[in-house]
Image (spheres, helix red, strand yellow):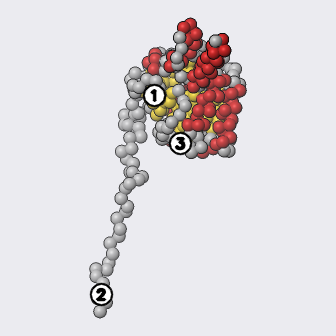
Amino acid sequence: MAGKAMAQEAVFALRETIARMEGKNIRAFDTSGDRAEEIVSTQEKRERLPFEVDALDQVLDGGLPLDGLTEIRTGAMKDAGAASGFTLAIAALVQNERNGISVGQGVGNGLPILWIADRLAVLEAGMPYALGLMDFGISPQTFLHARPRKLEDALWLAEAAAASGAFAVTILEVSGNLRHFGLTESRRLSLRAKTAGRPLLILRQAGEEEASSATFRFLVETAPAANRYLADGTMLGGSIGHSVFRLTLERSRNPTPFSLLLEWNSHDRRLSIVHTPAKSVLANGTAAYSGSDLSKIVDRSGAAAAMGTRLAFERAS
């Protein structure tokens, strides 16, 4: 009888470990009594990073998981800057949280950020710039950038970095939907992050939705920034204010589509919701980059052929 009870306890412990690593709800298992309540209570206390944006934190069940995989993607390479900026904003918030700095208290040092970029992603989207990182609210002294020559090396480095726990956050940037980076590789990265208790961000530039082990997936698009505020509270016309991202939550436990505009304050290291979208206008009042004066570069008719001078051919016989 005692042996049977011990065997059941061993099976339950194994199920508990697997469920925790996969991020599943332990209530789905056949549990009862104080043991189940204790495990569920522990799971509900999973460490998360609140964005201090009520609408976003609510759909994220309290915030971004600090012990799992999150994917950020763009539908086209033109949005690479916006996606990179949003990823850096998350990295800055995670770095502050790991260093014990509250939101809005500025830049801190401590655990570094590791950005791993696939070779093709670097060619298409470029590299982070040290002075730009400073303006964005991240100290270059705590930012490491790696450019492996092969995707296999990038995946190995991401796994090792997440498992080491030496970084506040690990970022893996790839371009498109790669054949050798599918559900199996995503699952392995997710397990490494959960085991180490560290966040791992996948930044997929110009990629489509695909099967993934990520807890959440965001689609990031560019959005016009508002004018810069002056000391007296007025706005400087024609200026460029804080970065703004159009964010769509594509993958979550909430089936309802969710989209909003977020503004990143690099000085305070804070995200805030934008209720009134800015318009892309120039100082003279015309729309910026409207495209009305540009011709299409694809699917357009060719130039008219020059008319010939021969009206008819002579008969052959």
Asked if the residue under mark 2 is in contact with the one under mark 1, i.e. CB atoms within 8 Å, the reply is: no
Q: Amino acid at mark 1?
A: Leu
Extreme residue toward the bottom, this view: 317
Element carrying mark 3: loop
Q: Amino acid at mark 2?
A: Glu
Extreme residue toward the top, this view: 34
Viewer can see residue 101:
no
Camera-side residue: 150 or 279? 150
Specify the label residue 177 is tagged with.
Answer: 3
Viewer can see residue 183:
yes
Element carrying mark 1: strand
**Above or below, comparing residue 171 to residue 44 in the picture:** below
Instruction: Using the rendered view, name the quadrant where residue 290 is placed.
Output: top left
**Above or below, comparing residue 247 to residue 106 in the picture:** below
Mark toward the viewer: 2 or 3 = 3
Camera-side residue: 240 or 312? 312
**Which residue position is annotated with label 1?**
249
Mark toward the viewer: 1 or 2 = 1
Instruction: Using the rendered view, name the quadrant where residue 275 is placed.
Output: top left
Please tell me which residue is depicted at 55% across the width and 31% down the height of the picture. 213
1 or 2: tag closer to the N-terminus? 1
Please tell me which residue is depicted at 38% across the width and 51% down the height of the picture. 295
Image location of residue 134, percent across then percent down: 63, 27
Asked if the residue under mark 3 is in contact with the one under mark 2, i.e. CB atoms within 8 Å, the reply is: no
From mark 1 to mark 2, how far is it between C-alphas? 71 Å
Q: Give the class, few, some or many, for how many residues have Cα within 10 Å of label 2's Cα (few <14, many ≥20).
A: few
Q: Taking 259 as reference, is 152 left or right? A: right
Image location of residue 138, percent across then percent down: 63, 25
2 or 3: tag closer to the N-terminus? 3
The total number of labels drawn is 3
Asked if the residue under mark 1 is in contact with the one under mark 3, i.e. CB atoms within 8 Å, the reply is: no
**Which residue position is annotated with label 2?**
314
